[in-house]
Amino acid sequence: MKIGIDARLFGPKTAGGGLGRYIQQLITHLQKLDHENEYVLFLRKSNWEEFKETPNFKKVMADYHWYTLEEQIKMPQKVRAEKLDLMHYPHFNVPIMARTRFIMTIHDLILLEHPTTRATTLGPLKYKLKFAGYKKVISQGLRRAKEIIAVSEYTKKSILKYFPKTVAQKIHVIHEAASELAQEDATDPTKDMEFLSSRQIRRPFLLYVGNSYPHKNLETLTRAFRKILEAKPDLQLVLAGQENYFSKRVEKDARELGLKVPEQVNFTGFIPDKDLPKLFRQASLYVFPSLLEGFGLPPLEAMNFGLPVASSNSSCLPETLGSAAIYFNPKDIDDMAGAIIQGLDNQALRKTLINAGNLQLQKYSWEKMAKETLEIYRRAY
């Protein structure tokens, strides 16, 4: 079987964030598992060098930006030229004119469940047109896909809430997993401290890793943090994620609240995978205030380093994190602040969360995800 994967969002540094990590881990583990089928990966110039070909995994340039007319027109042509048996679109953006047999992965339906013009740099009219296009693309994709992967039961329920129940028989829930971040310098804490110092990070600190899109709810987190500072004036909030329009807006809002940047709220910019362990090892608590997620990878990554987690109780997060987090209402500043303080101060609770985190992590595996996805390829073919 000759299988194509749309890998234009490959890697955690792309605009895909968690989606980019999902694609990266899927391909990495398929390379280990499958030496029988042939794979064609479609990449962009920006991530072309991140993937190294192996005997049955080749790459093809498809430098078309996602969510564009160019993607809709040129991607199907590029895919057809490879004469594939099956194509995997790991996101909802399946070109309407795609004719090659395909499966798709749905991570979330944030644009439907949390529609807001604050999530775009487009004007109101262009946003309406884009929103209509989004609904058309995802509806067509779901209808025509041979099989559909949802990354959580919550995402499956969301699909069935907004789209015809006839797709239910095609949906398969396949969970993601905590990323395998290297810890080569784990025995040398001085390297951790040198890194923190280079980024103006000081202990103790709260940690958030991810993007700054509106549904991530970072403005509410900064308001809760301002309240926490009344009891813990030495605490720092570290927001690690790629700098862009949305992170700058959160930073502007933090400054308007009277918070000092970077002394109190530190916007680190993008942190490469090799340095993320230094943050997870040295943080006092991981905080995940999101209003909506499809799976929720970062809190699991934190648990992988024995870091206690305080999380929003919204969407899929109780499903993903189970009893391994202290939960709060993401829209309630006082509740968020209270949970965070409890997560910092209650030593018995912290120990319980760390132990529960170790157990929760055992439920997920990227290898298992790849194996189950390979079964979907065979089923669709």
Image (cartoon, grey):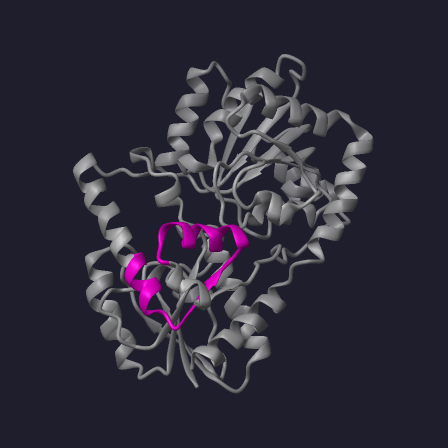
Judged left or right of residue 175, residue 129 is left
User: Residue 153, image x and y in percent?
Assistant: 54, 54
Name the residue nearer the viewer: 106 or 308: 106
The answer to whether any part of residue 78 appears in the image is yes
At a point 46% along the width and 41% down the height, the residue shown is 211
Task: Please state, as top left, top right, bottom left or bottom right, where the N terminus lies in the image.
Answer: bottom left
User: Residue 140, image x and y in percent?
Assistant: 28, 62
Q: Which residue lies most toward the left here?
A: 125
Examine the residues drawn in magenta and state their main secondary structure. Answer: helix
Judged left or right of residue 375, residue 365 is right
At a point 68% along the width and 58% down the height, the residue shown is 363
Asked where in the image residue 164 lies, by quadrant, the reply is bottom left
Judged left or right of residue 64, residue 147 is right
The answer to whether any part of residue 184 appears in the image is no
At a point 35% along the width and 44% down the height, the residue shown is 111
Residues rendered magenta in the picture: 138-164
In the figure, 139 relative to 336: above or below?
below
Q: Which residue lies most toward the right here?
A: 348
User: Residue 234, image x and y in percent?
Assistant: 66, 19
In the figure, 138 relative to 236: above or below?
below
User: Residue 274, image x and y in percent?
Assistant: 59, 52
At a point 42% along the width and 16% down the height, the residue shown is 256
Q: Is residue 157 magenta?
A: yes
Task: Please state, as top left, top right, bottom left or bottom right, where the C terminus lies in the image.
Answer: bottom left
Q: Is residue 365 magenta?
A: no
